[in-house]
Image (cartoon, helix red, strand yellow):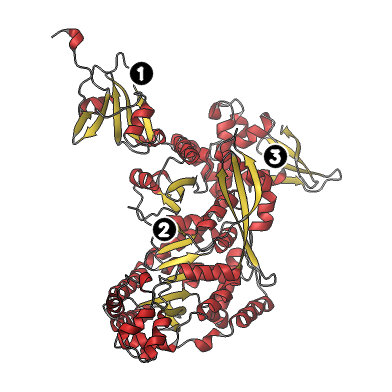
Amino acid sequence: MSFFNKRKSSGVFIPSGKGYVEYIGDIGNGSIVSVANSLGYHIDQLHSEYFSNYVKPKIYSIELEVFTRKIAFVITDANVTYITEKDINKYLKNFSATKVFNTLKTEDILTSAVENGSFSVEFLSKVLNLKDISKNGMFYAEKIKTYLYFTNGILTNFQMDDGYMPYSRHLQEVNQTIFKWISELAYKYWPKDDFKAKREINIQCDAWSRIPEAFGNQFINLHRTENGGANLHMILVCHYDYPINLSQFDEINHGRYKVEIEDSDIGIKIITMGNFRYYFDKSDEEDLLYFDRLS
Amino acid sequence: MIDDKIGYNSAYINLNLIDELDYCLGGYGKPNVEFLFSLNTFVETFIASSEFYTSLDELNHLNLTTPILFPNGRPILNLIARNGGLKFVDGVVDKPGLEIYRGNILVRSKKEAQQGFVLEYGQKIQEKYFIKSNINDELKTIPLIKSKFEEDNFIVSETQNSLDELVSNLMNVSKSSSIQTSLPIALYGKQMSSLNRTPYSIQSLDMVAKIHNAKVEDLKNNLNYQYLPIPSFTNILLSSVTSISEIPYKLGQLRLDFQELRDQFVQLEIDIYESATMKQQMEAYEKFIEFWKIFNKKYVDPKHRIFYGDFDFTQNADIDKGVDSFIDGSSIADSLKDVNTGKIIGNIIAKSYSWYNDRKVINRFKGITNIWELFGNSNSINQQLKHFERLFNVTFTNESISKVHDFVSKKLNNITKEISN
């Protein structure tokens, strides 16, 4: 047989039984969006794993239903006429649904879905294993630890709300040591107040996402905490000009500072903590006016 | 297939009540004396009910107001969502609103448009839409906001709903289900008067009794208020926590502990629905009551839930029209001519007769928190006051407690006289 007569495929394969078969239905213009639509998916419902790092890859991309390892379809080179489970396993050997669908990615997926009205209650109940839900209501999805709101069968809002903001959840996922340092202190100094403890954790985790080089920051040793961690938000205040007032200061340093002078003649409250002395305006706003290093 | 049918042993929880609970239990502010009632009604509902509902418009309101009112999270709303979810029914609030905000979405996402409203209306949301129960400031209407995307605009409108409308719509929506209601104290009196308005003529009861070979007295006994013993949930809850932030978690645990209670309520409704005759429905209820008394014996100082019993003749079946003919001496077949058979099961009289004779008069029960017992039992209220002082660091004067007691007595015309023990 001549090389030029070799059979070409549609380049789209779908799961069938224990293997994969070529999809020979209408694929429109052949784009992933077009294939997704013809197979009954909105593009928001899929996550693409691309393999451009392969030299001459047999598989260009594997399209998975979001939050799962369930394959919706596979895009291959047109010269590929069959693929096997073994091929898929080889290409997905480094894929981890837990790592890919992390907090920040989950937020992105849900934000697009709400914007485009693209997640039906049926779809989400399938990929998130939701039971006993209805077309209108608010439900908790344990798998992604998120509260979902449905109106007329469509996802209309969501809240990743266990008291942690996205960066807190993200830090918890990617660096448990630092998260533990932060939360240990928060709960030590807010022992009976879960809400205030989480507020402190959220502020410190947000600071972690903002300070240059995170825990490798040059000022880290000036702000070490008693458990070996660091007061990240105070690095922003002392070295990156972040404003703070007294009540905000107390939110993250409660029980860890000493009031040196409560009511000076010049209307200033002086507080010491760690290596620094802080001067707060005693007026209504109680803003931090300046600070200096203790000798 | 996912449908929105109201499930067995369900409860309607008003959003203002959830707001109030999140405010006090979420660490946003201190409770007032009216919160005693709010907490008790919610705890009873949360533990004893299998599913939770609020209205569809309240969902929309919740989406728009939560970022401002509860920036650090909503422990009680989340607790409900984690325990079966908060479902929404249409029809409780159902009227056009007055436009209060219009934002362009040409260059913004839907989320940004919503945030634009929240930023512009932040202070007003705080002032206008967080309603803390206060018997000294009697509410006439409850405002709700809802939004929609129309062409290139994000539009927010406000509806003002009278308390009467809210409650009567709620009663209408829940007509064909047994449902517990958890409402703020301001709506409680309205609920009582709405229940009392349920029109069952003696003739209609007589007709049902004849068709079902039951005694009118037995039917009457299944109507109106009845006591049902339940454990003293709020005292159990408050005595087992050392801080308010433990309350949501402990409440979730308590709900798990009382699974059998909910299973029995569900079974009662199934038994009633599946009973072939009216007599069997009443027997199912009596059997349930017997079980219930034994189940509750192990609890020291049980409290009582109030059940308002009524019959579900199915909506708009106009049974009393049929009754009039029946009383006039017509045959059953003739009397059923006047019944709106199209709304029953078909338009053949014989079929309608079969329908009545079959089972479709359902015993329904509306569960209501027993506020009289709470404020009338000095031992119980004193225990709760001590817990409030310990956990919330608040004390209430005897005068303020008496005021609530008086408010309840005046509004509700001493319901205890009407309750059959």
| Disc sitting over residue B83 in the figure | 2
Left or right: residue B112 compared with residue A41? right
Q: Nearer the viewer, mark 3 or mark 1?
A: 1
- Circle 2 marks a residue in which chain? B
Provide residue B405's location: percent of width, then percent of height.
62, 80
Residue flagged by tag 2: what amino acid is it? Answer: Asn
- Whether callout 3 and callout 1 share a subunit is answered yes
Q: Chain of mark 1?
A: A
* Quarter of the image where the C terminus of chain B is located: bottom left
User: Which of marks 1 and 3 precedes in the sequence?
Assistant: 1
Give me the C-alpha separation between circle 2 and circle 1: 44 Å
Q: Chain of mark 3?
A: A
Decide: marks 3, 2 in contact (CB < 8 A)?
Answer: no
Q: Is residue B129 left or right of residue B42?
A: right
- Percent of width and height locating residue B312: 39, 76
**Residue that carries the numbered disc 3 in the rendered image:** A244
- In three-dimensional space, the C-alpha distance between marks 3 and 1, rounded to whole angstroms, equals 47 Å
Q: Position of residue B248 (x, y in %)?
A: 49, 59
Q: Is residue B352 visible?
A: yes
Say which of A181 and A245 sits in front. Answer: A245
The kind of residue on which mark 3 rests is Ile
Give the camera-side residue of A150 and A289. Answer: A150
The reply to whether discs 2 and 1 touch (Cβ–Cβ < 8 Å) is no
Identify which residue is drawn at 41% across, 42% down: A119
Within 10 Å of disc 2 (Cα), the crowding (few <14, some 14-19, many 20+) is some
Q: Is residue A166 above or below residue B145?
A: above
**Label 1 CA crowd tier, 10 Å (few <14, some 14–19, many 20+):** few
Provide the secondary structure element on which disc 2 rests: loop
Residue bearing mark 1: A52
